[in-house]
Amino acid sequence: MKFKAVRVFEEEGRFIPRIIERSMEDLPAGDVVIRVAYSSLNYKDALSCTGNRGVTREYPHTPGIDASGVVVESTDSQIQVGEEVIVTGYDLGMNTDGGFGEYIRVPASWVVRKPEGISLKEAMIYGTAGFTAALSVYELVEVVKPEAGPVLVIGAAGGVGSHSVKFLVKLGYEVVGVVGSEAEREFVLSLGARDTISREEADDKSGKPMLKQLWAGVVDTVGGNPLSIGIRSTKYGGVVTTCGNVAGGGIPEMNVYPFILRGVRLIGIDSVKCPVGKRVDVWKRLSDSWKGENLDRGVLEVGIEEILEKVKKMLNSELVGRVLLKH
């Protein structure tokens, strides 16, 4: 059987993505074959399309680090044909052909049964970005309560950031988002944030080891200097989660004082190898108590013929909100 897929080829040192027809026999080894209903566009997918060896080592390759769909073949007794399932993380879309194809074959251990409270489309509106955001909020709300004060979301208009804003607002937190443009500001305010600040307003070049205590908690999605400033301006006993590095892998001007004098906690978020128990628990919360209204606000649904154009826009920082791929 033939199916459509995005395939990135390496040709004379250039990486060229194309939409091609593939055969089921071309899929990698695995226990479960899934007919993909939806995937979503993430920054890792865009990097994979450009030949980034930190994401994908070998080409040709099909990106798509998340997928939801229906099981069509299974050699695992715990996963039945016809079940609706979700796959995020692990090696999907990195070095294992991913959700930008109409079918995927994966190990059974990667597969999560979709909770009843959400549809296949809603699962990918969350996708890897929503799941990562949920992990961030999951860690923060264990310690920081709404009455403790505002929570800062750095990179609030992006995929992880916008979901984080939605979850925190749903749970009763006062949210302030860091944004890069007026369009981003309007978008983040529409999600329920109390206020936004620009990247310039959030910046600090004083080099002080600690800054004024402003935030009960911080959800950081970019790393680098914004993360450093977030840590140094977190209130006593606050929590900072971090899950990205688009602003840099280092933490400039950082020191131990926020941790030993204010008791600030820094928690790293890994959605790739998240333990299955926590994975199932978080998806359950996303399907019921954390699920907000207007889940599709800020979501653009496209077909496979349009996804490569959106990849270019993401790489040029021209996307606001989420892009959903429907097969």
Image: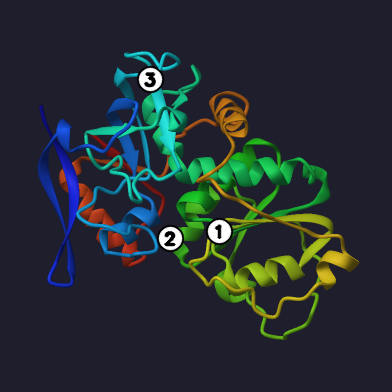
Question: Mark 1 or mark 3: which is in front?
Answer: 3
Question: Mark 1 or mark 2: which is in front?
Answer: 1
Left or right: residue 261 versus residue 65 is right
Distance from Cα at disc 3 to Cα at disc 2 = 36 Å
| Relative image position of residue 251 (x, y in whole percent) | 64, 73
Classed neighbour count for the residue bearing mark 1: other residues with Cα under 10 Å, few (<14), some (14–19), many (≥20): many
Report which residue position mark 2 lands on.
183
> Foreground residue, 168 or 307?
307
Residue 296: in sight, yes or no? no
Which residue does the image show at 13% across and 47% down from the upper left?
Answer: 19
Q: What residue type is labelled 2?
A: Ala
| Relative image position of residue 105 (x, y in whole percent) | 29, 32
Mark with earlier residue (1, 2)? 2
| Relative image position of residue 146 (x, y in whole percent) | 77, 43
Left or right: residue 215 versus residue 73 is right
The answer to which quarter of the image holds residue 103 is: top left
Q: Which amino acid does label 1 sit on?
A: Thr
Classed neighbour count for the residue bearing mark 2: other residues with Cα under 10 Å, few (<14), some (14–19), many (≥20): few
The label on residue 84 is: 3
Above or below 147: residue 290:
above
Q: What residue type is labelled 3?
A: Glu
The label on residue 210 is: none
Mark 3 residue element: strand
> Foreground residue, 197 or 162?
162
Classed neighbour count for the residue bearing mark 3: other residues with Cα under 10 Å, few (<14), some (14–19), many (≥20): many
> Foreground residue, 36 or 289?
36
Quadrant of the rendering where the N terminus is positioned: top left
| Relative image position of residue 309 (x, y in whole percent) | 21, 56
Mark 1 residue element: loop
Above or below 55: residue 135:
above
The label on residue 221 is: 1
